[in-house]
Amino acid sequence: MTPDEFGVAKTEEWMQGPVPSASVPSPAWAPPPLPPPPRRGTPTWVGVLVIVVIAVVILGIVTLAVLYGFVTGFSGPAPSKPVVVFAPPETITRGFSVEVAGATPSKATANYQVNLQEGPNMAAAQSLTASITFTIGSNSYTVAYADIGGEGALSAGDNFRVIRTTGLVADTEYRLRLVWSDGSQIASVTYTQGPSKPQVTVSSSSAITNGFQFTIATASPAKPTANFVVNFNVDATPGIPVALGPSMSFTVNGYMYTVTYTDVGGEGALTAGDIFAATKTYPVGPLAPGVTYHVTLLWSDGSQVVDAPYASPGYPQVIVAVPTGITNGFQFSVAAASQAKAISNYGVNFVVDTAPGIPIALGPSMTFTVGGNTYTVTYTDIGGEGALTAGDFFTATKTSPAGPLTPAVTYHVLILWWDGFQIADASFMA
């Protein structure tokens, strides 16, 4: 045995190590296995942050949903805005009007507001009601709304009228706006007021054949004739206004009247000296007695500038002398006539007892057929004035068959006014 370096006796076999077996080979050496590498991934703090963000977003959504629920729970969803279209504005007395041409869909008037603008100055919008007052500067306006159908909703055919008591301001642009409940504009319309009307005076009207005439005494300032409108009234019955022009026609109570205008200076403006004449043209003849006729000059907005009245004289009072017999007839004279009226104003009829002929215009010789007989009435204008006056002379004779009048029959010569009104009756019993 051999001792080692530490003095320990070891056998020779121990020192040589174990004897390898011939049948089982020794395995090859390999290093011990290493632990698996750590997994690569998101740090834990990032995940926590994502969770927090998601929670905040969800909380915001829930909060908004709760708030929306509160709002809609009390007021309900806001109605959608309609499309509203205005028709062109029209001039009315002391203002203008505008009609709703379309409103789709029709919405309750409670959803609307209205405001008014005068030139650059705008009033605050107000809720749409039947009558709204706007004050712009020192001017006060009324906007009247007519719900034509009475549905309580703005719809086609409804009407707005903008009025200022003393008339719109001259040379001014107005704008009427329709506003939705959220303050946005739905529709608007613009109207421009023309120049201010002048101060005009006229002369007294004087009679002419079948009518009357007058002149412009003053017109300050001179304004173009295009700014004026004319109407014709018979007593309180008006015609239909027309634009001022050289010749204008009016029909009132079935009669036609013509008003002519002469621009004496040719300036194209109404000025002092210009002439108006009014005549009855259908049927042609004198004006009715005791009637007041008016030529009314209007401004473009329909307001009156000046009125030229003319009172036609009443029926004349005519008295005839007692008729006296002549061969085959009778005769009489005019004892008195309160007014010397042209013979063209008169008509005549011939009546046998109660059977009338057909009235005809007064003239030198007039023929009537009554009951199969023919009668001739003659008229003599003694003074030659062309008017019925005291002293004028009438005769009535039976001319076919020629012969004396029938005894115990009353014959009448009726003097009539042109409108058929009886002025005098000259009666004679044969």
Image (cartoon, helix red, strand yellow):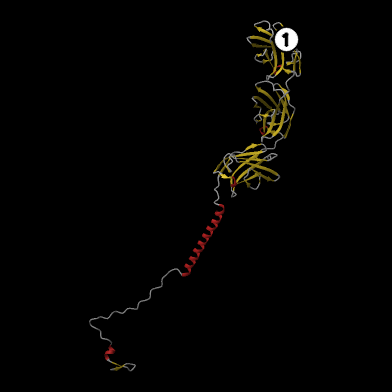
Residue 348's x, y, as percent? Answer: 68, 15
Q: Residue at x 48, y 65 (%)?
A: 51
Q: How many marks?
A: 1
Asked whether 272 or 354 is in front, the reply is 354
Q: Residue at x 52, y 60 (%)?
A: 62
> SS of the residue at dot 1?
strand
**Residue 380: which quarter of the image?**
top right
Residue 381's x, y, as percent? Answer: 73, 13
Q: Residue most toward the front? A: 408
Which corner quadrant holds the C terminus? top right
Residue type (three-letter) at the residue carrying disc 1? Gln
Q: Is residue 409 above or below residue 166?
A: above
Using residue 33 as the reference point, say whether residue 166 is left or right of it: right
Would residue 399 be seen by someone viewing this image from the given angle? yes
Q: Which residue in the structure is indicated by mark 1?
A: 331
Pointer 1 local density, CA inside 10 Å: few below 14, some 14–19, many at least 20: many
Q: Residue most toward the left? A: 23
Asked whether 59 or 397 is in front, the reply is 397
Using residue 151 as the reference point, say whether residue 320 is left or right of it: right
Q: Is residue 340 above or below residue 328?
A: below
Using residue 270 as the reference point, say whether residue 148 is left or right of it: left
Q: Residue at x 55, y 54 (%)?
A: 73
Residue 308's x, y, as percent? Answer: 72, 29
